[in-house]
Amino acid sequence: MPFIFNKSFIISFLLLLIFFAFITFLGEDASVRVHDNLEANIAWYKSLADQHLLLVSSYTPNETVMQAPRIAFGSEWSLIAWLFVWFKPIVAYNINVILMSLVAFIGTFFFTKDTFKLSPKIAPFVALGFALLPFWFSGGLSSAGQPLLFWSFDRILKKHNSAIDWIIFILFPFYSSLILSGLFMMVLMAGYLGFNFLKKERKVAYGAGILSLVILTIGYILVDYRLFLDILKIGTPAGFIPHRVEFMQGNTFAECLIAAKNSFLGGQNHFPSFHTYLILPLVLFYLIYGFIKQKKLITFIFYLVILGIISVIDGFWNFVGFETLKDKLPILKAIQLDRFYSLYPILWFSVFMLIIRELSIKIAIALACIQVVIVFFSNQLVEDYIKKVIHTRDYVSYREFYAEDLFSKVKTILKQDKNRNKRVGMVGLHPAVAQYNQIPTIDGYVVLYSLDYKHQIQSIIQPELNQNEFIKNYFEQWGSRCYLFDNEAVIAGDGILKKQKCCTEKLDYNFDKLKQLKCGYILSAVEVNHPSEHLKLLSKVEDDNWLVWIYKVL
C-alpha cells in the first residue's frame, strides 16, 4: 500500500515506536495513574488471576478483595483480563497500553485520511496526536478504538466495506467496555444513521448499517452476559441488594453549571482529549473567520452542539433535582449516562480535522505537530519523568506503589503470628496494595458489593465518620471506596500517604464489629498513639517510600 512509504507516516510511526520503547524501558519504574487504576483495576485483575476466579459464577466471593462478588470485576471475555493470566502484571499492563495506542494510531490514520479526506501527509501526525493520549487502562479500545470503529462504520454505510470491517465489529466488544463507551458509541452511530435517513440520503447502505449495530449489540451482550443476567435477576442471590442503591449526588444548579463549563473547556480525566490549549482557540478563530467569509459551517457547528450537549449531560448528571428520578429508575444508578463524555476525544479531534483540512498542508502539519507535543508532554508518564530528571521531584512509581518486597516482609510477620484471622484492614493505605500482594482485606474499592456489607463497615467506622463531614458524606452517599476511614489519616491528593511524621491519636472504631468480619490485623501508614486494649503493635516495616505499622486486633 502506497501510504506505507509516505515520509509523514514513517516519521510518525517511528516516533510512536520510540514512545513504546520508553514505556518498556521504564517498566515498573514508570509513573502510573493511581486514581481508578493502581488503587483498583490492576489489583482486581491480578486477584482474579491469582485465585483462578475468571470463570467462576457471578456471586462467588473474591476472598482477597473484601469478599466482593465475582460480577464486580468485569468479564472473562475481555482481552485485558486474560493478559493478566498470561503475563506478569506489569507486562500485561504495558502490552495493553501499547495495543491501545497502536490501534488508535492505525484507526485514526484511516479515519482521518478516508473519512475526513485529509492529505496522507497530514493524517499520520493527527493519528500520532490521538495515539499518544493516555487512554484509561481498563477501557481497552473504549476510547482508543473509536476512530477504527467509526472508520469501518463509514465504509459500511458507503458500501466500500470489506471483510475486515465486519471483523472489527465482531471483535470490538471483546476489547472494550459497554458501560464505559460502547453504549454511547452505538447511540452516536444510530443517530448518524437516522440523520441520513431523515435526509433521504440514497447512497447510504441502511440495512448494512443496522446489521453492523446489531452485531455490536450481540457482541456486548455476550461479553457482559453477567451484567444482563443480573439485570434480569437470573442467578442473583435472594435478598442481595447492591450498595449502589444508596448513591446520592446533590449538586446545586450553580455547581452543575460550573461542572458543565469545565467539562466543555477542559474535558474529562478518564477520557482526556487535551483540546484546551490548541483545538479550542482554533475553534474560536475558525468561527470568526467563517462568519466573516460567510462559509458554510453547518457540520462544524453540529459537532460543537453535540459536544455542548455532552458537557451539559456531564455537568448536570449529579444535579440534586434528578435524584428522585434515579430512585425510581435504579438502572440510572447502574449505567451512568454522563459517560457520553467518552466520546470527547474522537469528537474534539474530529473538530480539529475539520479545521486543518481547510488549511495548506504545511500549516496543517505544523498544527498537528503542535497538538502532538501538547499531548506528549501532558501525559503523566512523560510529565513526571521530566520532573524527576530535571527538577528532581520524585514520583511514586508502579513498583513503589505496590511495594512487593516490603509487603513480602509484612506477609512473613502475619504468617509467623498465631492468629486464625488473617484478613487485614488498611488505615491511610489503599487496600489495593495489600490485595495486589495477596493479603486479603476487609476493605477495598469495588463497584458492586452488598448494601449489608457496606452497613457492616459503616458500623465499624461510624465514630470516625461523625468527626469529619467530608468523609461521612463521601462514604454514606457513595461508598464504592469502602475504606476503614480515619479522621486523622485521610488518603488525599494523589491518593498516597507516603512516610508520615504525623500520627493518629486513636482509631475510634467499633472493634467488636471489626472482629465479626474476621479482621485480624490493621496495617497503618501512621502510628496509633493510643492503640487501646484492642490493638497490639507487632512490628513496623519500611522502605524508601512506605512506613507500615502492623497492629494485631485483640
Image (spheres, helix red, strand yellow):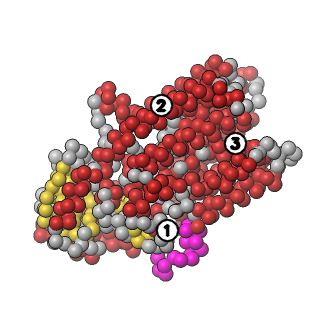
Residue 347, percent from left and from top = 63, 40
The residue stretch that appears in magenta:
226-248
Disc 1: CA contacts within 10 A as few (<14), some (14-19) or many (>=20): few
Q: Looking at the rendered structure, which numbered label has been put on residue 151? A: 3
Kindly identify the residue that appears in the image at 59 percent across and 27 percent down.
Answer: 10
290 or 76: which is nearer to us? 76
Amino acid type, label 2: Ile
Q: Quadrant of residue 389?
A: top left
Residue wearing tag 2: 18
Check if residue 239 falls in the magenta segment.
yes
Kindly identify the residue that appears in the image at 77 percent across and 30 percent down.
Answer: 296
Kindly identify the residue that appears in the image at 44 percent across and 50 percent down.
Answer: 92
Dot 3: element: helix
Which of label 3 and label 1 is nearer to you?
1
Q: Is residue 521 left or right of residue 443?
A: left
Residue wearing tag 1: 55
Which of label 2 and label 3 is nearer to you?
2
> Does residue 276 appear anywhere in the picture?
no
The quarter of the rendered structure image containing the N terminus is top right
Residue 199, percent from left and from top = 83, 45
Closer to the chain start, of discs 2 and 1, is 2
Amino acid type, label 1: Leu
Check if residue 385 falls in the magenta segment.
no
Disc 3: CA contacts within 10 A as few (<14), some (14-19) or many (>=20): many
Residue 345 to residue 233: above or below: above
